Amino acid sequence: MKFSALVLASVVGVAAAGKPHLSLSVRDGNFDGLDGLDPTLSWENSARSGDLDISYGVEASARPTTDIASLPRKIWGQASTSSNGWGVSARADMDAQDLGNADLQIDANNDANDLSLRLTASAGNGFNVRSVEATKGIDLDKNSRVTIRPRVDLENDTRDVEVNYSNGNSNVRLCASADNQEVTWSQQLDGDNRVAPTVNSNGDISVEYERRLSDDSSLTANLKPNQALDLEWRDAAWTANINMPIDGANINGANVNIKRDVSF
């Protein structure tokens, strides 16, 4: 415990030298006064050691409390380097209350071959691979591009392949697995409007509509009949998400989350 506290204090002290970032969200539920606010403060910094680019940071709650040990939420670190045309990075995310375990993500990218690989795993009592995926891009001509992404989820024992085709203002996405096949067609109608219907082999249909209100403001609506209507409004640093469950023609209440990011 003393070792964990020392490591945490060292990381916070070094990361605090960077630029802090405050994210202010509204928690779900009914609260009195300002108890419904959920402020989160994060710091990050970077350095270089030999051929390695290193970045690190900490995320902590900014809520008043007498239990200081409960404030830190997450500590993360990332190292990146390049070798023989490959860019490789490894990132570890740790729960500040459980420094004995970490979520790992390893990425490798080769720009010359338009190929990238990603592996996610967990480390603690052992090294357990969670998922593996690869992405291969193919430029058909100046405006057309295809990307193929096979994925294996070892935790849930699932495998699928995602194929994306883009051509100017149109994009078609096909995701196929043993249990389901899904197609999404995204069409940019003009500079301010985009629509994207999705249909799968189970007969489920959804439609996403995005409207650009200004350079830094947009409204996105995603309708899933008999499931939910999701709205997201972005206005500069403000983000509001509204989820409204749907049963037939009835809307059963609404869940609202409002968030603002503040950089110092």
Image: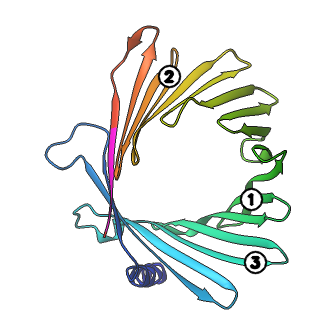
Q: The residue under label 3 is which amino acid type?
A: Ser
Q: Earlier in the sequence, mark 1 or mark 3?
A: 3
- The residue furthest top is 249
Q: Using a 10 Å C-alpha cutoff, classify the residue at mark 2 as few (fewer than 14 neighbours), some (14 to 19) or many (20 or more).
A: some
Q: Which residue is mark 2?
A: 223
The magenta segment: 257-263
- The residue furthest left is 33
Q: CA distance from mark 3 to mark 2?
A: 43 Å
Residue 258 painted magenta: yes
Q: Are marks 3 and 2 in contact (CB under 8 Å)?
A: no
Q: Earlier in the sequence, mark 3 or mark 2?
A: 3
**Placement of 239 over or under 101, stated as above or below:** above
Q: Which residue is mark 1?
A: 119
Q: Position of residue 206 (x, y in %)?
A: 58, 22
Q: CA distance from mark 2 to mark 1?
A: 32 Å
- Tell me the chief SS of the magenta region: strand
Q: Quadrant of residue 10?
A: bottom left
In the image, 177 versus 112, the foreground residue is: 112
**223 sits left or right of 141 in the view:** left
**240 sits left or right of 112 in the view:** left
